[in-house]
Image (tube, rainbow, N blue to C red):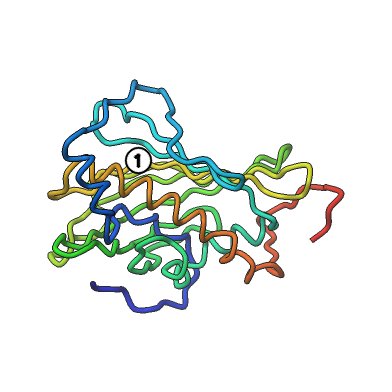
Amino acid sequence: MRQLPDRTTPGFTLLPALLQRQMPARFLAALVLFLPAALAAGEWKTVLESDTLLVQERAYHGSALHEIRGTTHLDASLNAIMALLKDAPFNRKWVYRSGGARILQESGYAQAYVYGVVDAPWPMQDRDTVVRFDYEQNPDTGVIRISISNFPDFIPADERFVRVPDFGGYWQLTPQADGRVEVIYQVYGDPGGWIPIWAANYAAVTSVTRTLQNMGTAVARYSAVRSDYVNEPQTGKRR
């Protein structure tokens, strides 16, 4: 599958890919024969829960596609996590099925338009995305929120890819009293083109799950990073 060349300009991370390479045969058979009942609008359903990760899904307004929310806790600073999220060349190393990303336009630290490629499994065509990331930090609580907005017409379409027509969500980083950071990643996406609804929903859950599972190891390389735009909370644990 095609990949973007490495870039040296740092930027917000590419969205976790919507599609996965392989699915267990027994799981596919079960889905074909017994499609799950539709989720009630607004009702979160837990699809994976462990000591370190919670992944949930719910119906998205006016669509058969699901919105996915993943929650984990990282033993890392806010600065380190933000450095990871803003390192575009590195995202293919930890974001599930990322084909790479590059910065199209930046407005200081707080906003960036990012182009990314989704490495789709054969025989499906690769996808590409154009999104805007908006960063803000609550000065009282220290909570960071990075909103994700879709801008598919920001640059002309590339005939090699299917441009993702609808995508949105956010990252939220909440400092904890024990010095860790709660990370929430919530997204909704329509991959466009042809793909069965059940496959898109299953792949979206897998994408969020694998990306958050990879995050803890990936963030360690940024432990010494500090930024004037990210304020660390005052806790008893020093990093």
Q: Would residue 195 appear left or right of 231 to someone viewing this image?
A: left
Q: In the image, is residue 74 above or below residue 90?
A: above
Q: Would residue 82 appear left or right of 167 to someone viewing this image?
A: right
Residue 151, percent from left and from top:
30, 49
Q: Given the image, on which type of amino acid does mark 1 rest?
A: Tyr
Q: Residue at x 36, y 52 (%)?
A: 131
- Which quadrant of the view contains residue 80? bottom right
Total tally of numbered discs in the picture: 1
In the image, 115 versus 206, the foreground residue is 206
Residue 67, percent from left and from top:
36, 36
Q: Residue furthest right?
A: 236
Residue 138, percent from left and from top:
66, 40
Q: Which residue is mark 1?
A: 188
In the image, 117 versus 207, the foreground residue is 207
Q: Residue at x 16, y 60 (%)?
A: 124
Residue 135, percent from left and from top:
54, 49
Q: What is the secondary structure assignment of the residue under circle 1?
A: strand
- Which quadrant of the view contains residue 93? bottom left
